[in-house]
Amino acid sequence: MENHITDTSQDLAQLQLDLIKKRKSTVAFSEQEVTKDQLNQLFEAARWAASCFNEQPWRFIVAQKSQEGLFEKVLNGINEHNQVWAKNAPVLMLTFAKKTFAKNEKPNMHYMHDLGLAVGNMSAQATAMSLYLHQMAGIVRENIQKDFDIPEDYEIVSGIALGYKLDIENVPEEFKLRETKERTRKSLNEIVFDEAWGESSFKN
């Protein structure tokens, strides 16, 4: 029985790792709707992220395409380069993080880190649901501030497009190269060190 439990745990761990590796920032979204229940699951995953002193400094503005006015306002906060493909996503989001601790208003040096953990949870959950989440640094902060009147204590951080991926045969020609190019990552030797900086015993 113990060996069976260990094998099952290893299988689940490998499944989780495979899901993380499957994550992709698509630029070719289908028109298929993302439901409110699905969004609730994604934000529930974000809600349970770890954060410094459990501050949970992350905030989101989310717009479904059916919310035309709000969707256009969020799209206005994304730069023109990203708007070309992001406008096709059924859901757009903007992310924010509180720069100070709520309990004493002292600077929170980890607010960006914690927002990243929340979006990381959301990204993993999206992949498990066969959804694709594309994060964008290319936003227009002045437009977001003007359109949403963001409190001074909150950093405007990023945009997110969310939806289902188009079948490759339906992807517009201008996006096909981005959709089919090989995904690469640095080796563990380049990012994980032990006794000396730049030296690692990790292999991959």
Image (cartoon, helix red, strand yellow):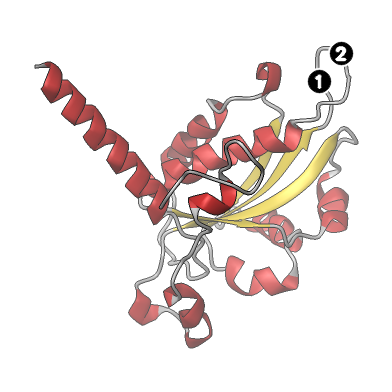
- Would residue 7 be found to the left or right of residue 136 on screen? left
Q: Residue furthest left?
A: 1
Front in this rendered view, residue 28 or 147: 28
> Which residue is painted at 75% across and 47% down in the image?
157
Q: Is mark 1 on a helix, strand or loop?
A: loop
* C-beta proximity under 8 Å, tags 2 and 1: yes
Q: Which residue lies furthest to the bottom in this view?
A: 173
> Which residue is painted at 12% across and 24% down in the image?
4
- Would residue 193 be found to the left or right of residue 102 on screen? left
- The N terminus: image quadrant: top left
Binning the other alpha carbons within 10 Å of mark 2 as few (below 14), some (14 to 19) or many (20 upward) gives few
Q: Is 96 rendered above or below residue 56? A: below
Q: Mark 2 points at which residue?
A: 104
Q: Which amino acid does label 2 sit on?
A: Asn
Q: Name the residue under label 1.
A: 101
Q: Is 86 rendered above or below residue 47? A: below
> Which residue is painted at 54% across and 68% down in the image?
88
Front in this rendered view, residue 43 or 25: 25
Q: Where is residue 114 in the image (x, y as percent from the top left)?
A: 66, 32
Q: Which amino acid does label 1 sit on?
A: Phe
> Which residue is painted at 63% across and 75% down in the image?
84
Query: Residue 109, labelled with which disc?
Result: none
Q: Where is residue 173 in the image (x, y as percent from the top left)?
A: 48, 87
Front in this rendered view, residue 73 or 99: 99
Q: Position of residue 98 (x, y in %)?
A: 79, 31
Q: How far is mark 2 from mark 1, CA to CA?
A: 6 Å
